[in-house]
Amino acid sequence: MARKMKLVLGLTAIVFAVCNPAFAQSTKTANTLNLDKKENMPKATVADFAWLAGHWSGEGLGGRCEELWMPPMGDNMIGMFRFLKDGRTQFVELFSLVVEGESLVLKLKHFNADMTGWEEKHEVVQFPLVKFTANEANFDGLTYRKKDDGTLESFVVLKGKDGSLSELAFRFKRVKD
């Protein structure tokens, strides 16, 4: 009887793992997730991410960082990121949270201070949505988390030349305009 029960429990666990969309992700780094099955991206609209809108400023990469998210409009949210060190702009990013199917993908491009691009003309860095809550957005390799004190944390995965993964953390406070 005990052997039969173990078999039933084991099969139940396998069925649950295969059928449950929560298993569409695995841990990538301490604060980020990996999208394991693109077909299991959650249904979402840009309105679900209105909490990101605003001007955010903080520290990261050994310098000053700013991130600006415009409110949702139509089928996207757009924004920019700026990194300054020793009072000089080092690089900027332009990004857009866009609808793909019934879910969302965050697409971005990097630029040097003189606006020369890092990616090729038709290439963008893409972060498909893995899961989200009322104050957290988990994209494949990128997480935004709004804390109870109103601060915004961001975590992004970097891949080393040897294939190893590391995580960069940013902590922002809302700028009062």
Image (spheres, rainbow, N blue to C red):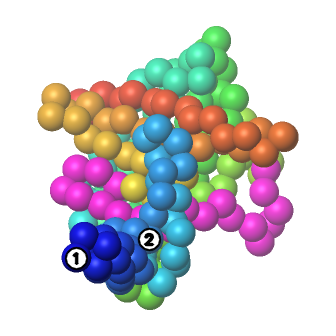
Q: Nearer the viewer, residue 21 or 139?
A: 21
In this rendering, the label closer to the viewer, 2 or 1: 1
Residue 10 lies, in percent from the top left, at 35, 73
User: Where residue 5 appears, x then y in whole percent?
Assistant: 25, 75
Q: Quickly name the residue at label 1.
A: 1
The kind of residue tagged 1 is Met
Is residue 14 on the magenta stretch?
A: no
Q: Position of residue 92 (x, y in %)?
A: 63, 41
Residue at the spot x=57%, y=35% of the render? 167
* Label 1: how many Cα within 10 Å (few below 14, some 14–19, many 20+): few
Q: Residue furthest front?
A: 1
Q: Where does the C terminus fall, quadrant-wise? A: top left
Q: Residue at x 54, y 49 (%)?
A: 28
Residue 122 visible, this orientation: yes
Task: Write the residue at 25% across / 70% down.
Answer: 2
Name the secondary structure under disc 2: helix
Residue 76 visible in the snapshot: no
The amino acid marked with disc number 2 is Ala
Horizontal and vertical percent position of residue 125: 66, 60
Q: CA distance from mark 2 to mark 1?
A: 33 Å
Number of marks present in the image shown: 2
Q: Which residues are magenta?
A: 118-137
- Residue at 53 percent across and 42 percent down: it is 29
Q: Relative to residue 140, is residue 120 drawn left or right?
A: right
Q: Indicate whether 63 appears above or below 147.
A: above
* Quadrant assignment for the N terminus: bottom left
Dot 2: within a 10 Å radius of its alpha carbon, few (fewer than 14), some, or many (20 or more) residues?
A: many
Residue under pointer 2? 24
Instruction: State which quadrant residue 134 falls in.
Output: bottom left
